[in-house]
Amino acid sequence: MELKDLFEAIVDGKLEMAVAVTKGAVSDGIQPDEIITDYMIKAMEEIGKQFEEGRVFVPNLLMSARAMKGALDILRPLLRGRQDMYVGKIVIGTVKGDLHDIGKNLVASMFEGCGFEVINLGVDVSSDKFIKTVAESHADIMCMSALLTTTMNYMKVVIEDLKKAGLYGKVKVMVGGAPITASFARSIGADGYTSNANAAVVMAKQLIGVN
Ligand code: B1M
């Protein structure tokens, strides 16, 4: 089996195949970053395109997501293995109304792999839950993810509630997800936006003054 079979396995929603090819790639010494960026993310983009064109439907998305998660589970311990020092604490979640978590979990894994302690709140996270967790954990950074144009505006609600709770400025706020842009992030008062998981780690370190 070759790595291009991983792309096909995720697009076709074949979990066992995705896991087998990923295990093979790892034992061949291929770096997790390459497997994720060049095959797994590209496969999710492809299934998204097919969905947009009406060629596949929600059950297909779910099967692809399951295959992607299975493959990512193989790589996650390797990403964690890079950790050599504690950098800071991050609270991360997908905002209320939104159930997309693949990208958010990838970002969370990259943070963990680079030395951050991560509190992953999951999906459909309310403003109350974000704020309570930030307050109790004394997190350095709060990260919000949204994949839907209908849910991205909830990020502003959370930031407004953060202000009311007196935490705005005390915790750095980062946002991300396919529909988010740098100008949207600025307009809602976020401290940072990145389009992908690697850049999120670089920005998080910059925001808290660690190299
Ligand atoms: Co949905 N979905 N989905 N979906 N889905 C999209 C997002 C969509 C673009 C598909 C399309 O039409 N082309 C579209 C949104 C349209 C819009 O809002 N403009 C859409 C829709 C419409 C829907 C439903 C409404 C469909 C329906 O029911 N009719 C529904 C909504 C459910 C809900 O959330 N309430 C729905 C449901 C689902 C599934 C549950 C079936 C499944 C998600 C499963 C899961 O996540 N567990 C799903 C999927 C898989 C997708 C696509 C195909 C793939 C998303 C993905 O995982 N990408 C997606 C199409 C697409 O994106 N091309 C689509 C791979 C992932 C690695 O990328 O999440 O972008 P991404 O994360 C990146 C960056 O964005 C960034 O880093 C990550 C890694 O590089 N990033 C951050 C993400 N979060 C960050 C946070 C940060 C920083 C960076 O914090 C600092």
Image (spheres, rainbow, N blue to C red):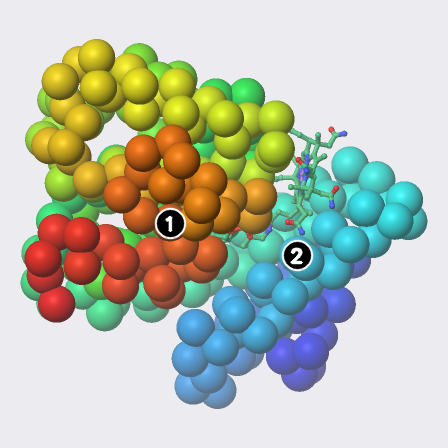
Helix, strand, or loop for circle 1? strand
Q: Is residue 129 visible?
A: no
Q: Image quadrant of residue 24?
A: bottom right
Q: Is residue 32 visible?
A: yes
The structure residue drawn at horizontal position 27% and vertical position 58%, both measured from the top left corner, is 203
Residue 123 is situated, as x and y percent measured from the top left of the image, at: 46, 29
Q: Which residue is mark 1?
A: 193
Q: Earlier in the sequence, mark 1 or mark 2?
A: 2
Q: Is mark 2 within 8 Å of ligand 1?
A: yes
Q: Image quadrant of residue 157?
A: top left
The structure residue drawn at horizontal position 33% and vertical position 56%, both measured from the top left corner, is 200
Q: Are marks 1 and 2 in contact (CB under 8 Å)?
A: no
Helix, strand, or loop for circle 2? helix
Relative side of 84 to 110, left or right: left
The structure residue drawn at horizontal position 60% and vertical position 34%, both measured from the top left corner, is 148
Q: Which residue is mark 2?
A: 44
Q: Is mark 1 within 8 Å of ligand 1?
A: yes
Residue 20 is situated, as x and y percent measured from the top left of the image, at: 60, 68
Q: If the image is split into quadrants, where does the C terminus sit?
A: bottom left
Relative side of 163 to 11, left or right: left
Residue 158 is situated, as x and y percent measured from the top left of the image, at: 35, 22
